Amino acid sequence: MCYSAMVVADYIRYTRDYGVELSIQDFYELFHRRHADPKLKIPKAMELGFAGNEAAAGQQINALIAAFNAEQTIKLEQELFKQRKRLADAQRSLEAKVTKTAADSERIAGDKVRWTLAKLADLRRTTLEDRDARIFPGHYALVIVMEAGRRVLKPMRYQCRPAGKPAFYDQKYPGTYNARRDSLGGFWKDLFGYSHGLMVVNAFFENVDAHKVQGRELAEGEKPSNVVLEFRPQPVQDMLVACLWSRWSAPGEPELLSFAAITDEPPAEVAAAGHDRCIVPIRPEHIDAWLSPDPKNLKAQFDILDDRARPYFEHRLAA
């Protein structure tokens, strides 16, 4: 499965390279909703994509982002004051007498001070780093869909909750950020052939057993250990990853746009690295056909998945 990906969040590139329009209303609603639900995970790259946008709608979104960051800064500064006081108190206690309680308090407070300072630095930073574009299950990402014959870019949660399912579906099926190709006609039959999308990524990440990466069997009594591999296509390129998506709603609940990336059997180099699944990058010439599926002709959609782009994936240990 693809548990993480490096997404492209440059809105100008979407417009230029893929003829995409931004669904400004969906972006506005997402950033507005985050004020009431700060736990929404929106990558910094998605925020900074609006920096310098002089259109009225872009300025409104930037205002929402700035207001949220200001609120979070106040909370973090209050936490920093609290933990620095705790740290100082623990250090004074240790000067008088060394106890496990004081030592634990010093260690915990020190860790929290460092964590809070790092969060504050991230909030204030205005330059992009690679990690700002990396998404994990539950994070929001950018997905291209078709609306009224137009390619449209929407922010969606990377874990699909199909329309009509209860909210606890997320906990019951935590792996619904990926849709296996061999389950498209079963588990995903209500979306496959109806609601297709594309996510533009230039790398993906997988959890792999260390001994498989090393090409060996486990030694007697050895327990498997995990490493994270980063896979990048060669030559370097953006990949149009096939996705399924849904618009979920329920009385008294905010609307949710969410998606899953389709995965299939891996190419030889991914399998050799120790992983058994891979995302499916489609060819650019199939964009419109993929985004406008005919549910009465699912074979055409399977043909698109089979006629996928096939770059060579180099891998390395993830930073």
Image (spheres, rainbow, N blue to C red):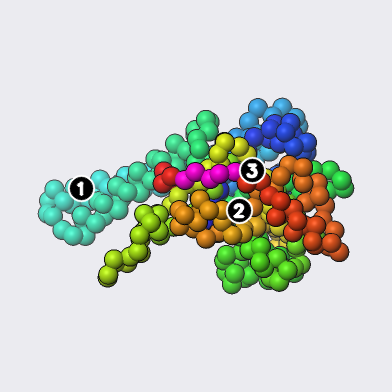
Please name the residue that numbered disc 2 is placed on. Answer: 279
Q: Name the residue furthest left.
A: 97
Q: Nearer the viewer, mark 1 or mark 3?
A: 3
Give the residue displayed 25% in from the left and 51% down from the top: 106
Mark 3, other Cα within 10 Å: few <14 / some 14–19 / many ≥20: many
Disc 2 marks a residue whose amino acid type is Ile
Q: Which mark is residue 91?
A: 1
Main secondary structure along the magenta-highlighted residues: strand
Q: Amino acid at mark 3?
A: Met
Q: Quadrant of the C terminus?
A: top left
136 vs 309, left or right, is: left
Label 1 to label 2: alpha-carbon separation: 51 Å
Q: Relative to the observer, which residue lies in front, 77 or 26?
A: 26
**How far apart are the alpha carbons under marks 1 and 3?**
52 Å
Q: Nearer the viewer, residue 173 or 221?
A: 221
The residue to which callout 3 is attached is 239
* C-beta proximity under 8 Å, tags 3 and 2: yes
In the structure shown, which secondary structural element does the residue marked by tag 2 occupy?
Answer: strand
For marks 3 and 2, give the CA distance. 10 Å
Circle nearer the N terminus (1, 2):
1
- The magenta span reads 311-315
The residue positioned 86% from the left and 64% from the top of the image is 296
Q: Is residue 252 visible?
A: no
Would you place residue 286 above or below residue 296 in this image? above
